[in-house]
Amino acid sequence: MHQILTRSLLFAALLVASTLSFHTQSMAQETDTQTAQENTNASAADADHARSLQGGTVTTLFDGKSLDGWRGRDDLWSVEDGMIVGKTTDEAPISKNTFLILNDEVEGDFELSLQFKIENGNSGIQYHSRVLDEDEFVVSGYQADIDAANQFAGILYEEKGRGILALRGQSVVVSETGKKQVETFADAAELGNGIHPGEWNDYRVVVRGNQLEHFINETQTMKLTDNQTEKARHSGVIALQLHKGPAMTIRLKHITLRQWK
Protein backbone atom coordinates (compact mmCIF):
# COMPACT_ATOMS: atom_id res chain seq x y z
CA MET A 1 0.00 0.00 0.00
CA HIS A 2 2.81 2.40 0.89
CA GLN A 3 4.56 1.63 -2.43
CA ILE A 4 1.35 2.25 -4.40
CA LEU A 5 0.83 5.59 -2.64
CA THR A 6 4.45 6.61 -3.28
CA ARG A 7 4.14 5.74 -6.97
CA SER A 8 0.88 7.70 -7.23
CA LEU A 9 2.47 10.78 -5.66
CA LEU A 10 5.48 10.48 -7.97
CA PHE A 11 3.23 10.20 -11.04
CA ALA A 12 1.23 13.25 -9.95
CA ALA A 13 4.43 15.26 -9.44
CA LEU A 14 5.69 14.32 -12.90
CA LEU A 15 2.32 15.26 -14.43
CA VAL A 16 2.39 18.70 -12.77
CA ALA A 17 5.99 19.30 -13.90
CA SER A 18 5.12 18.32 -17.47
CA THR A 19 2.08 20.61 -17.51
CA LEU A 20 4.11 23.55 -16.16
CA SER A 21 6.80 22.96 -18.79
CA PHE A 22 4.19 22.91 -21.60
CA HIS A 23 2.59 26.16 -20.44
CA THR A 24 6.00 27.79 -20.04
CA GLN A 25 6.95 26.85 -23.60
CA SER A 26 3.57 28.04 -24.93
CA MET A 27 3.92 31.39 -23.16
CA ALA A 28 7.44 31.78 -24.57
CA GLN A 29 6.19 31.03 -28.09
CA GLU A 30 3.33 33.53 -27.69
CA THR A 31 5.80 36.16 -26.48
CA ASP A 32 8.11 35.50 -29.44
CA THR A 33 5.16 35.71 -31.86
CA GLN A 34 3.93 38.93 -30.27
CA THR A 35 7.42 40.44 -30.40
CA ALA A 36 7.80 39.50 -34.06
CA GLN A 37 4.40 41.01 -34.85
CA GLU A 38 5.31 44.19 -32.99
CA ASN A 39 8.57 44.40 -34.94
CA THR A 40 6.65 43.93 -38.20
CA ASN A 41 4.16 46.64 -37.23
CA ALA A 42 6.99 48.95 -36.24
CA SER A 43 8.72 48.38 -39.57
CA ALA A 44 5.48 49.12 -41.41
CA ALA A 45 4.95 52.23 -39.33
CA ASP A 46 8.50 53.35 -40.11
CA ALA A 47 7.86 52.80 -43.82
CA ASP A 48 4.62 54.78 -43.67
CA HIS A 49 6.37 57.56 -41.78
CA ALA A 50 9.13 57.66 -44.38
CA ARG A 51 6.45 58.14 -47.03
CA SER A 52 4.29 60.58 -45.07
CA LEU A 53 3.16 63.81 -46.69
CA GLN A 54 5.00 65.91 -44.12
CA GLY A 55 8.41 67.49 -44.55
CA GLY A 56 10.49 66.82 -47.60
CA THR A 57 11.86 69.36 -50.06
CA VAL A 58 9.52 71.52 -52.13
CA THR A 59 10.66 72.67 -55.57
CA THR A 60 8.87 75.25 -57.73
CA LEU A 61 8.63 73.82 -61.26
CA PHE A 62 7.28 76.97 -62.95
CA ASP A 63 8.62 80.43 -62.10
CA GLY A 64 5.55 82.26 -63.40
CA LYS A 65 7.63 84.20 -65.92
CA SER A 66 9.06 81.81 -68.50
CA LEU A 67 9.09 78.21 -69.71
CA ASP A 68 12.68 77.72 -68.58
CA GLY A 69 13.13 74.07 -67.63
CA TRP A 70 10.34 72.91 -69.95
CA ARG A 71 10.24 71.90 -73.62
CA GLY A 72 7.35 71.76 -76.08
CA ARG A 73 5.92 73.36 -79.19
CA ASP A 74 6.52 77.11 -79.08
CA ASP A 75 3.41 77.78 -81.17
CA LEU A 76 1.16 76.03 -78.64
CA TRP A 77 2.60 76.89 -75.22
CA SER A 78 3.19 80.32 -73.69
CA VAL A 79 3.22 82.24 -70.42
CA GLU A 80 0.49 84.78 -69.65
CA ASP A 81 -0.03 86.64 -66.38
CA GLY A 82 1.91 84.09 -64.33
CA MET A 83 0.25 81.08 -65.96
CA ILE A 84 1.33 78.36 -68.37
CA VAL A 85 -1.15 78.49 -71.24
CA GLY A 86 -1.60 75.70 -73.78
CA LYS A 87 -3.89 76.53 -76.68
CA THR A 88 -5.04 74.92 -79.92
CA THR A 89 -7.27 76.43 -82.60
CA ASP A 90 -9.78 75.15 -85.13
CA GLU A 91 -7.79 76.92 -87.85
CA ALA A 92 -4.64 74.94 -87.07
CA PRO A 93 -5.75 71.71 -85.32
CA ILE A 94 -3.14 69.31 -84.01
CA SER A 95 -3.10 65.77 -85.42
CA LYS A 96 -1.84 64.04 -82.27
CA ASN A 97 -1.61 64.70 -78.55
CA THR A 98 1.37 66.85 -77.68
CA PHE A 99 2.97 67.81 -74.37
CA LEU A 100 4.95 70.44 -72.54
CA ILE A 101 7.65 68.32 -70.88
CA LEU A 102 9.67 69.07 -67.75
CA ASN A 103 13.35 68.68 -68.62
CA ASP A 104 14.37 66.96 -65.37
CA GLU A 105 13.08 63.46 -64.71
CA VAL A 106 11.55 62.68 -61.32
CA GLU A 107 12.29 59.45 -59.46
CA GLY A 108 10.58 57.82 -56.49
CA ASP A 109 7.97 59.22 -54.13
CA PHE A 110 6.57 62.70 -54.60
CA GLU A 111 3.61 65.03 -54.25
CA LEU A 112 2.85 67.20 -57.30
CA SER A 113 0.55 70.18 -56.72
CA LEU A 114 -0.86 72.72 -59.15
CA GLN A 115 -3.92 74.74 -60.11
CA PHE A 116 -5.67 74.32 -63.46
CA LYS A 117 -8.47 75.86 -65.50
CA ILE A 118 -9.67 74.23 -68.69
CA GLU A 119 -11.75 75.68 -71.51
CA ASN A 120 -13.08 73.00 -73.87
CA GLY A 121 -11.39 69.75 -74.76
CA ASN A 122 -9.25 67.38 -72.74
CA SER A 123 -5.91 67.67 -70.97
CA GLY A 124 -3.91 65.91 -68.32
CA ILE A 125 -0.82 65.78 -66.14
CA GLN A 126 1.70 63.10 -67.02
CA TYR A 127 4.02 61.66 -64.36
CA HIS A 128 6.57 58.84 -64.23
CA SER A 129 6.28 58.97 -68.01
CA ARG A 130 8.72 58.41 -70.86
CA VAL A 131 9.26 60.44 -74.00
CA LEU A 132 8.43 58.53 -77.19
CA ASP A 133 9.07 61.31 -79.72
CA GLU A 134 11.29 64.27 -78.88
CA ASP A 135 10.48 66.10 -82.12
CA GLU A 136 6.71 65.93 -81.65
CA PHE A 137 6.84 65.99 -77.82
CA VAL A 138 4.89 62.74 -77.43
CA VAL A 139 4.97 60.85 -74.13
CA SER A 140 3.60 57.66 -72.61
CA GLY A 141 2.74 56.91 -68.98
CA TYR A 142 0.51 57.69 -66.02
CA GLN A 143 -1.86 60.62 -66.54
CA ALA A 144 -3.99 62.54 -64.05
CA ASP A 145 -6.86 63.39 -66.36
CA ILE A 146 -8.52 66.79 -66.89
CA ASP A 147 -11.49 67.48 -69.18
CA ALA A 148 -13.95 70.30 -69.75
CA ALA A 149 -16.92 67.91 -69.92
CA ASN A 150 -16.03 66.76 -66.39
CA GLN A 151 -16.42 63.12 -67.31
CA PHE A 152 -12.81 62.04 -66.82
CA ALA A 153 -11.26 64.68 -64.54
CA GLY A 154 -9.55 62.95 -61.63
CA ILE A 155 -9.24 59.50 -63.19
CA LEU A 156 -5.95 57.69 -63.85
CA TYR A 157 -5.27 57.03 -67.51
CA GLU A 158 -2.14 55.51 -68.98
CA GLU A 159 -1.29 57.45 -72.15
CA LYS A 160 -0.24 55.09 -74.95
CA GLY A 161 -0.35 52.21 -72.49
CA ARG A 162 -3.02 50.31 -70.60
CA GLY A 163 -5.72 52.97 -71.00
CA ILE A 164 -8.01 53.74 -68.07
CA LEU A 165 -6.56 52.25 -64.89
CA ALA A 166 -8.92 53.76 -62.31
CA LEU A 167 -12.13 55.75 -62.70
CA ARG A 168 -13.35 58.40 -60.28
CA GLY A 169 -14.31 56.91 -56.95
CA GLN A 170 -12.39 53.67 -57.53
CA SER A 171 -9.65 52.01 -55.50
CA VAL A 172 -7.89 49.58 -57.84
CA VAL A 173 -5.22 46.95 -57.32
CA VAL A 174 -3.49 45.73 -60.48
CA SER A 175 -2.00 42.25 -60.13
CA GLU A 176 1.32 41.02 -61.52
CA THR A 177 -0.56 39.64 -64.52
CA GLY A 178 -2.52 42.86 -65.10
CA LYS A 179 -5.82 41.73 -63.62
CA LYS A 180 -7.66 44.53 -61.80
CA GLN A 181 -9.41 44.23 -58.44
CA VAL A 182 -11.80 47.19 -58.13
CA GLU A 183 -13.56 48.63 -55.10
CA THR A 184 -15.76 51.73 -55.11
CA PHE A 185 -15.20 54.21 -52.27
CA ALA A 186 -17.22 57.18 -53.58
CA ASP A 187 -19.85 58.04 -56.19
CA ALA A 188 -18.26 59.30 -59.42
CA ALA A 189 -21.02 61.84 -60.13
CA GLU A 190 -20.83 63.29 -56.62
CA LEU A 191 -17.05 63.62 -56.93
CA GLY A 192 -17.61 65.39 -60.24
CA ASN A 193 -19.80 67.96 -58.51
CA GLY A 194 -16.72 69.13 -56.62
CA ILE A 195 -14.79 69.84 -59.84
CA HIS A 196 -15.45 73.10 -61.68
CA PRO A 197 -14.56 73.29 -65.40
CA GLY A 198 -13.90 76.84 -66.54
CA GLU A 199 -12.80 77.80 -63.03
CA TRP A 200 -9.59 77.32 -61.04
CA ASN A 201 -9.23 73.94 -59.36
CA ASP A 202 -6.49 72.45 -57.17
CA TYR A 203 -4.92 69.17 -58.30
CA ARG A 204 -2.59 66.96 -56.23
CA VAL A 205 -0.89 63.78 -57.38
CA VAL A 206 0.67 61.66 -54.64
CA VAL A 207 3.05 58.80 -55.45
CA ARG A 208 4.32 56.46 -52.73
CA GLY A 209 6.01 53.40 -54.14
CA ASN A 210 3.52 51.66 -56.41
CA GLN A 211 0.57 53.48 -54.80
CA LEU A 212 -0.82 56.37 -56.85
CA GLU A 213 -3.49 58.83 -55.64
CA HIS A 214 -5.25 61.84 -57.17
CA PHE A 215 -6.96 64.67 -55.31
CA ILE A 216 -8.96 67.56 -56.80
CA ASN A 217 -9.92 70.41 -54.53
CA GLU A 218 -8.63 68.31 -51.62
CA THR A 219 -11.04 65.45 -52.32
CA GLN A 220 -9.59 62.07 -53.29
CA THR A 221 -10.78 60.95 -56.71
CA MET A 222 -8.96 57.60 -57.13
CA LYS A 223 -6.32 55.26 -55.76
CA LEU A 224 -4.25 52.67 -57.60
CA THR A 225 -1.78 50.03 -56.43
CA ASP A 226 0.21 48.93 -59.47
CA ASN A 227 1.74 45.48 -58.96
CA GLN A 228 2.27 44.79 -62.66
CA THR A 229 6.05 44.91 -62.60
CA GLU A 230 6.62 44.96 -66.35
CA LYS A 231 4.26 47.94 -66.77
CA ALA A 232 4.60 49.96 -63.55
CA ARG A 233 7.04 52.87 -63.55
CA HIS A 234 8.94 54.50 -60.70
CA SER A 235 10.63 57.35 -62.53
CA GLY A 236 10.16 59.52 -65.58
CA VAL A 237 9.07 62.92 -66.80
CA ILE A 238 6.25 65.22 -65.75
CA ALA A 239 4.37 66.69 -68.71
CA LEU A 240 1.25 68.74 -69.50
CA GLN A 241 -1.10 67.68 -72.29
CA LEU A 242 -2.81 69.34 -75.22
CA HIS A 243 -5.27 66.85 -76.71
CA LYS A 244 -6.02 66.55 -80.40
CA GLY A 245 -9.54 67.48 -81.49
CA PRO A 246 -11.58 70.68 -81.15
CA ALA A 247 -9.92 73.94 -80.10
CA MET A 248 -9.06 74.04 -76.41
CA THR A 249 -7.19 76.02 -73.78
CA ILE A 250 -5.56 74.77 -70.59
CA ARG A 251 -4.13 77.14 -67.98
CA LEU A 252 -1.89 76.03 -65.10
CA LYS A 253 -0.09 77.81 -62.27
CA HIS A 254 1.52 77.32 -58.85
CA ILE A 255 3.22 74.07 -59.93
CA THR A 256 5.31 72.58 -57.12
CA LEU A 257 6.91 69.23 -56.36
CA ARG A 258 7.51 67.82 -52.87
CA GLN A 259 10.01 64.98 -52.58
CA TRP A 260 11.39 62.83 -49.78
CA LYS A 261 14.99 61.61 -49.81
Image (cartoon, rainbow, N blue to C red):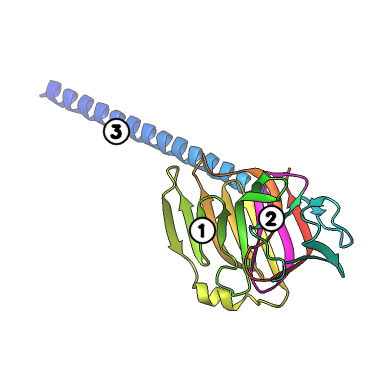
Q: Point out the residue furthest to the top here.
A: 3
**What residue did someone put label 3 on?**
19
Task: Kindly indicate the quadrant of the structure image that contains residue 221.
Answer: bottom right
Q: Secondary structure at mark 1?
A: strand
Tell me if label 1 and label 3 are in contact, CB under 8 Å.
Answer: no
Front residue of this view, candidates 5 and 22? 22
Please state if 204 lies on the left or on the right of 74 as rendered.
left
Q: Which residue type does callout 1 highlight?
A: Ile
Please state if 32 lies on the left or on the right of 250 as rendered.
left
* Image location of residue 161, percent across then percent down: 54, 50
Q: Earlier in the sequence, mark 2 or mark 1?
A: 2
Check the image and report above or below for 5 versus 127.
above
Classify the position of the C terminus by image quarter.
top right
Q: Tell me which segment is drawn in magenta.
A: 103-127
- Whether 100 is among the magenta residues is no
* Image location of residue 13, percent across then percent down: 26, 28
* Badge nearest the viewer, 1 or 3: 1
Task: Kindly indicate the quadrant of the structure image that contains residue 213.
Answer: bottom right
